[in-house]
Image (cartoon, helix red, strand yellow):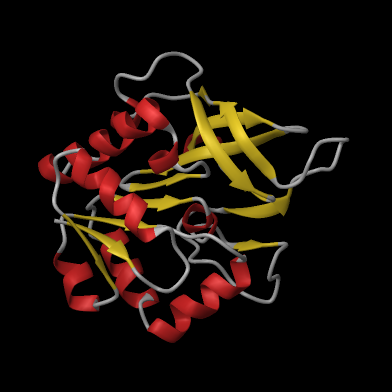
């Protein structure tokens, strides 16, 4: 079973439906025991970084998340959930992130482009991963965000995207993965990614 963490800041049902369409079992839950016992975890999120971290803190789920990530089982952050994996953000600068990925979240540069970055854009995969198995070169996915992740270590970067400059649109450090885009809104490409994640949870392999 894949646990989709409910902490009041996520597009939960569409993510759940994406996992179900991938042929896996999923449950939206804020229960620490259910999360700890799951085969894989998804941390979704929409909204502001500070609000999300405050909500996670109030829910007392941060220790559960950190313990699960340390277990080696697949863990995926989506959109704001990916940003939460980092050390911190310019948005809600007084709140620390989960610190699972070294790096920082910064506001997208204006550069004459509309902020938020909303719509379809391409991914440039910079390393191989089971999460991206079967994807064509430079696949298009759906983004909605005003802040973007910048990983400290190049080895943690899975894909980059250009929007007023490069940002890291997908990351992976071992079993911990993150997607800035919304796979549940990204058509066939997103469904392939969710199916790959479900398969990783089944075989217990994230490398």
Q: Is residue 71 left or right of residue 189?
A: left
In this view, the residue farthest toward the right is 112
In this view, the residue farthest toward the top is 137
Residue 18 position, x and y percent, is 29, 44
Residue 5 position, x and y percent, is 33, 66
Residue 49 vertical placement versus 26 (above, below): below
Residue 149 appears in the rendering: no
Name the residue: 69% across, 50% down: 146
Name the residue: 54% across, 79% down: 54
Q: Is residue 197 left or right of residue 38?
A: right
Residue 140 position, x and y percent, is 51, 24
- Tell which of 152 and 63 is nearer to you: 63
Name the residue: 65% across, 54% down: 105
- Tell which of 93 and 195 is nearer to you: 195
Q: Quadrant of residue 56?
A: bottom left
Residue 45 vertical placement versus 120 (above, below): below
Q: Is residue 73 left or right of residue 10?
A: left
Name the residue: 30% across, 19% down: 134
Residue 20 appears in the rendering: yes
- The image quadrant where one finds the N terminus is bottom left
- The image quadrant where one finds the C terminus is top left
Q: Is residue 128 left or right of residue 109?
A: left
- Tell which of 78 and 172 is nearer to you: 78
Residue 129 position, x and y percent, is 34, 29
Q: Please state the total of marks drawn on the protein image.
A: 0
């Amino acid at each position: 079973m894949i646990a989709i963490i409910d902490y009041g800041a996520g597009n939960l049902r569409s993510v759940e439906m994406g996992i179900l369409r991938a042929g896996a079992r999923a449950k939206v839950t804020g229960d620490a025991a259910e999360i700890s016992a799951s085969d894989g975890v998804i941390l979704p999120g929409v909204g502001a970084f500070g609000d999300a971290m405050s909500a996670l803190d109030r829910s007392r789920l941060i220790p559960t998340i950190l313990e699960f990530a340390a277990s080696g089982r697949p863990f995926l952050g989506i959109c704001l959930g990916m940003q939460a994996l980092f050390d911190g953000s310019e948005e809600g600068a007084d709140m620390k992130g989960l610190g699972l990925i070294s790096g920082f979240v910064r506001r997208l540069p204006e550069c004459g482009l509309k902020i938020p970055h909303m719509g379809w854009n391409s991914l440039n995969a910079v390393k191989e991963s089971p999460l991206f198995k079967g994807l064509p070169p430079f696949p298009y996915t759906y983004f909605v965000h005003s802040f973007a992740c910048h990983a400290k270590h190049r080895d943690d970067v899975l894909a980059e995207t250009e929007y007023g400059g490069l940002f890291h649109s997908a990351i992976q450090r071992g079993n911990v993965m993150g997607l800035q885009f919304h796979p549940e809104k990204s058509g066939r490409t997103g469904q392939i990614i969710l199916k790959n994640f479900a398969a990783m949870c089944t075989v217990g392999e994230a490398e």
